[in-house]
Image (spheres, rainbow, N blue to C red):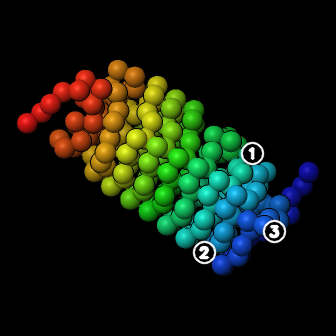
Amino acid sequence: MNLPFIADKTFENQDFSQARLAKGEYENCVFVGCIFSEGYLDNQNFMECEFVECDLTNANLKHTIFKEVVFKDCKLVGLHFEDCNDLLLSIQFEACNLTLASFYGLILKGTPFSDCVLHETDFSECDLTSAVFAHCNLEKALFYQTNLSKANLSSSFNLNIDPEQNQLKKTRFSKENLLGLLKKHDIVID
């Protein structure tokens, strides 16, 4: 099925939660203040697009392509990014709320997360090699069988990462967040 091609268009303050965004291949488009909450973004293609101050809470992302897509100041609560088409997946997040989002099993090498809330976000079985978590709140974020080699978590906080269950070769931490690597041992440090 050939999807319509939409390029270089800006969508502002539109509500796509009831009337869905038209199926298409969106390239170099900007979505500002749009609402996709509980809506359908399945089987869409977004290439070199930007989402700014959008609400995508619990949107359906089945088979969606996100290639070189930036999310800024967006509410992305409960999104299942593992449902996306992972072939060309290339995303970055700036000041986003990703509470309860899931990236289960995805390859996200070098992905930047900056100033994000990642409460209870699932990174199980992800490849986050060289990913950067800059000033992120990782409270109750789930890391299990996750490759965090060469990742930078040095400015993030509320970490709870089990070194025995994850790959941490050359992973960067600050002295302050080293406690998050020892939580399972219930050690008291004065």
Counting other residues with Cα less than 10 Å from the Cα at mark 2, is it few (<14), some (14-19), or many (20 or more)? some
**Image spot of residue 2 (x, y percent):** 89, 55
Q: Residue at x 23, y 27 (%)?
A: 186
Amino acid type, callout 3: Ala
Task: Quickly name the residue at label 1.
Answer: 63
Instruction: Kindly check if marks 1 and 2 are in contact, taking CB atoms under 8 A apart as contact.
Output: no
**Image spot of residue 61 (x, y percent):** 70, 50
Task: Quickly name the residue at label 2.
Answer: 33
Task: Determine the CA span between mark 1 and mark 2.
Answer: 24 Å
Report which quarter residue 47 is drawn in: bottom right
Amino acid type, callout 2: Gly
- The relative height of residue 14 versus residue 26 in the rendered view (above or below) is below
Counting other residues with Cα less than 10 Å from the Cα at mark 1, is it few (<14), some (14-19), or many (20 or more)? some
Q: Residue at x 43, y 41 (%)?
A: 141
Residue 109 seen: no
Task: Determine the CA span between mark 3 and mark 2.
Answer: 16 Å
**Image spot of residue 118 (x, y percent):** 44, 49
Ranked by sequence position, the earlier of labels 1 and 2 is 2
Report which quarter residue 26 is drawn in: bottom right
Q: Secondary structure at mark 1?
A: loop
**Image spot of residue 112 (x, y percent):** 44, 51
Amino acid type, callout 1: His
Q: In the rendered image, which quarter contains the C terminus?
A: top left
Residue 94 seen: yes
Q: Nearer the viewer, residue 17 or 169?
A: 17
* Closer to viewer: mark 1 or mark 2: 2
- The relative height of residue 38 versus residue 14 in the rendered view (above or below) is above
Ranked by sequence position, the earlier of labels 3 and 2 is 3
* Closer to viewer: mark 3 or mark 2: 3
